[in-house]
Amino acid sequence: MVIVLSMNVQPARRRIKNFKEVSLGLPKKAVIEEARRCLQGADPLCLKGCPLGIDIPAFIRFLRDGHVSAALSKIKEANCFPSICGRICPAPCEGPGQFDQEDVRRVELPPRRWCKGIRVLERYAADFGNPRFAVKERKPSVARAGKRVAIVGSGAAGLTAAAQLAEKGYRVAVFESMDRPGGALRYGIPAFRLPRKILDDAVRGLKTSGVEFKTNCYVGRTILLEDLSRQGFEAILLATGGGIPKLSDIPGADLGGVYYAEEFLMRVNLARESALLRKELNFPLGAKVAVIGSGNVALDCARLAVRLGPAPGGASRKVTVLSPRSWDDKRAFQQECAYGQEEGVSWESPVKPLELIADVHHFVSGVRCVRLDYADVETQGRWELMPVPDSEFVFEADTVIMAVGHGPNVLMNRDCPGLRLNADGGLWAGEENSMTSLEGVFACGNVIKGGSVVEAMASGQKAAEDIDRYLKGR
């Protein structure tokens, strides 16, 4: 079993405008100390927790011995974009690694302590694995003579599949409806969590390997799937992601001043990053912002709202997360929640929003909530959050952001009725070959079923392998 024993080493922080802070990862000394806490067991459970199959014990050994470049090379054997995963991956590999009783007796530590630190170790290897002062040769794009593959969507799954197929010698073209590639990585994640330079470097590396990007091209409207086949693409991969927000059934969700998280993040990310903190937004954002949700998207919206500076008129902006989960049961990263609190984000939990209250102008003015507490359900020993009697209250807010989840982006099904949907509302694709109901058309990532970034990347890897087998007639 491989276990990384964390001493809760806090990542370095730097100050940015408006005194907000951004994590810079661990320093070298802390990385080596963290890597040396890996026990390098015979049956590493962290391997089973990584969807990409990264050899975690091997790259930690390299870091422990100070061989950062070797650690990065080992990671890249299974992960094309360690700089991205090292920042936004939910790190499922850190969950399964626990002490068993033998480990407890040997190291004299309390049982069932979680494995920690793998993600920040991967980030360090990605950030410092390449020689810092090496002269980077600008290589021309590779002209390939292989079969042509079209990828619709340039998010995590699409970029991963493009990298894998280009490495196998195929001529890959990525079609993106927005003006810049990246999908949800660019337009759904704030820049303070995933710097745009990291994403741009990943796209630049794909262009160097011969991948062609066609932006402002909406497949299904600008160009049809049939047109791609007529242009010589022998396989098409649909990786349009999961950016369709789930509509809330809370009364008042259609009031003015109410935004869905996907809309809010995209509007802000579409603005020029250099002018983000200097110019007013083109949509109203009040002084009292309430974010409804408990996951990473809700926290991203809250931290981003704090960074947008004072409210109109110069009033200070107060941002509060109304979470239906308790503080210990929230789905957002624990470290990110701590950063949010340092930056001024407040938490009101556990509460359940019941209704959005309107003012005379039909704009939101508050959220009527009820407090929750754990109760024994039907005396069966099952403890669940239940409403507390006579605990309703009104939380004043002139802006509400609904971070209640999103579903697969299956708008292409409207333009191509031959595509079949699954029971979850995503595109149907065979588990054994990733092919949709149309011959030669494949699907991967969150357009099939929602999941994390690393799960989407793993799905893109599998789809690339399936396309390779299909085109080779195996």
Image (cartoon, rainbow, N blue to C red):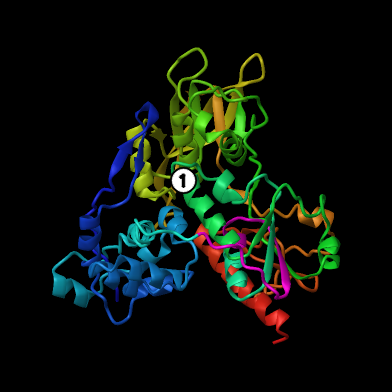
Would you place residue 55 above or below residue 246 in this image?
below
Where does the image place residue 390, in percent across and percent down from the top left?
Answer: 45, 30
What residue do we see at 67% from left, 73% from top? 170
What residue do we see at 38% from left, 38% from top? 340
Q: Please, what is the three-letter code of the amino acid marked with disc 1?
A: Pro
What residue do we see at 30% from left, 60% from top? 116
Would you place residue 177 above or below residue 358 in this image?
below
Where does the image place residue 29, in percent across and percent down from the top left?
Answer: 20, 57
Q: How many marks?
A: 1
- Image quarter of the C terminus: bottom right
Q: Is residue 441 magenta?
A: no
Where does the image place residue 167, in percent across and percent down from the top left?
Answer: 58, 73
**Which sits in the foreground, 373 or 322?**
322
Q: Quadrant of residue 31?
A: bottom left
> Which residue bears the numbered disc 1?
195
Q: How would you rate the neighbour count of disc 1 (Cα within 10 Å): few for under 14, some for 14-19, many for 20 or more?
A: some
**Which sits in the foreground, 326 or 271?**
271
The range drawn in magenta is 138-159
Whether residue 195 sits left or right of residue 355 in the image: it is left
**Which sits in the foreground, 334 or 206?**
206
Where does the image place residue 20, in percent across and percent down from the top left?
Answer: 36, 32
